[in-house]
């Protein structure tokens, strides 16, 4: 089965690439059961699993480690919308009163921040200047702390030979805060600011810290059981219309569409078969079928 691909716009607009991504677009295949199987593995290495699905779903011949980290975020966001829709349910604990709030976010509101790139890789301070590079996916995977990130995105510092020594011992806190602000102003980013909410109990504003990572897809190891039940049901009860191999390679949104259609059809058949029974006949022994309510 040959899947059609989707074209995604990158937040970087291709500005930082010298390959086919310089057009600011990338092509991806939609999720199938294969990618869901990967993400629902019982593994503590989230980055390794994300690497696998990136390699599986990106059509373009690119090294995923060279992708900008923000572009990877945009790719995963687009895939989440394509495969599971724009609605994203979150549970937020109010920092003021500790009440738990349930919200449904519209992922379409996450957009790239419009910027005109006149990129200068030098951030100037009073007594020194810092040469920087964009954060790549490979850098993000290596970094375990904010200081690690600084050491990766800083290429050189005037009057300092060691970047590690500068970050650990000589980078003043006020300069570090100013650096992050200036760095953010020249680099591509996704805009999460449209997500605002207030606590339903105390009416005070609450921050929404949405992270685009493995958990963003909600595919836990327990999901594997649900996934393979869906595959079995669609292959078995479609009476030859699908086999397991075809179902496994269907895009997630198509698999769920066909499964819902099959469920609706079976429920109608059940209703029609029950019309032949008289009201006095007992119906407890009538099979409900795999899609009926228990």
Image (cartoon, rainbow, N blue to C red):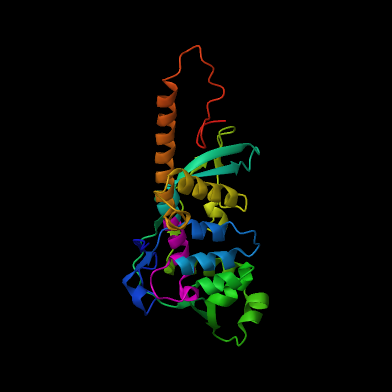
Q: Residue at x 53, y 26 (%)?
A: 286
Q: Which residue is drawn at 62% across and 85% down?
A: 162
Residue 152 drawn above or below residue 72: below
> In the image, residue 175 lies at what x, y percent?
57, 70
Nearest the eye: 187 or 41: 41
| Residue occupying image coordinates x 43% and y 62% | 75
Judged by its main secondary structure, the magenta piece is: helix
- The residue positioned farthest toward the left in the image shown: 23
Q: Name the side, left or right, on which 271 lies relative to 284.
A: left
Where is residue 136 shown, x and y percent of the image? 50, 73
The C terminus sits in image quarter: top right
Specify whether residue 190 is painted magenta.
no
Which residue is painted at 58% across and 70% down in the image?
141
Q: Magenta segment, which residues?
A: 57-79
Q: In which quarter of the image is residue 28?
A: bottom left
Q: Residue 148: x percent and y percent?
A: 62, 72
Quadrant (top left, top right, bottom left, bottom right) of the N terminus = bottom left
Q: Does the magenta stretch include residue 69?
A: yes
**Given the current orientation, which residue lies at the most extreme top position?**
280
Q: In which quarter of the image is residue 146?
A: bottom right
Q: Nearest the camera: 205 or 48?
A: 48
Q: How many marks?
A: 0
Q: Which residue lies furthest to the right in this view?
A: 169
Expressed as whole percent of the image width and height from the top left, the position of residue 277 reads 45, 18
Does residue 159 appear in the picture of this structure?
A: yes
Image: 246 above or below 50: above
Nearest the camera: 236 or 19?
236
């Amino acid at each position: 089965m040959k899947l059609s691909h989707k074209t995604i716009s990158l937040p970087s607009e291709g500005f930082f690439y010298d390959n086919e991504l310089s057009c600011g677009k990338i092509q991806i295949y939609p999720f199938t059961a294969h990618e869901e199987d990967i993400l629902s593995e019982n593994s503590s290495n989230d980055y390794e699993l994300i690497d696998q699905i990136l390699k599986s779903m990106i059509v373009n011949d690119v090294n995923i480690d060279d992708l900008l980290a923000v572009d990877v975020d945009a790719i995963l966001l687009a895939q989440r919308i394509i495969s599971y829709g724009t609605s994203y349910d979150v549970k937020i604990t109010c920092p003021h009163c500790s009440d738990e709030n349930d919200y449904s976010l519209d992922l379409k509101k996450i957009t790239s921040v419009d910027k005109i790139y006149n990129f200068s890789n030098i951030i100037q301070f009073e007594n020194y200047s810092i040469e920087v590079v964009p954060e790549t996916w490979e850098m993000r995977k290596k970094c375990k702390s904010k200081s690690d990130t600084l050491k990766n995105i800083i290429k050189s510092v005037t009057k300092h030979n060691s970047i590690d020594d500068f970050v650990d011992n000589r980078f003043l806190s006020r300069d570090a805060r100013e650096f992050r602000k200036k760095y953010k102003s020249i680099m591509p980013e996704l805009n999460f600011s449209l997500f605002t909410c207030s606590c339903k109990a105390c009416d005070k504003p609450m921050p929404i810290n949405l992270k685009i990572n493995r958990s963003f897809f909600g595919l836990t190891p327990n999901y594997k059981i649900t996934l393979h039940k869906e595959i079995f049901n669609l292959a078995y009860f479609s009476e030859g219309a699908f086999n397991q191999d075809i179902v496994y390679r269907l895009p997630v949104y198509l698999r769920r569409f066909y499964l819902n259609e099959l469920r609706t059809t079976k429920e109608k058949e059940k209703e029609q078969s029950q019309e032949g029974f008289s009201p006095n006949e007992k119906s407890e022994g009538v099979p409900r079928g795999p899609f009926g309510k228990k």
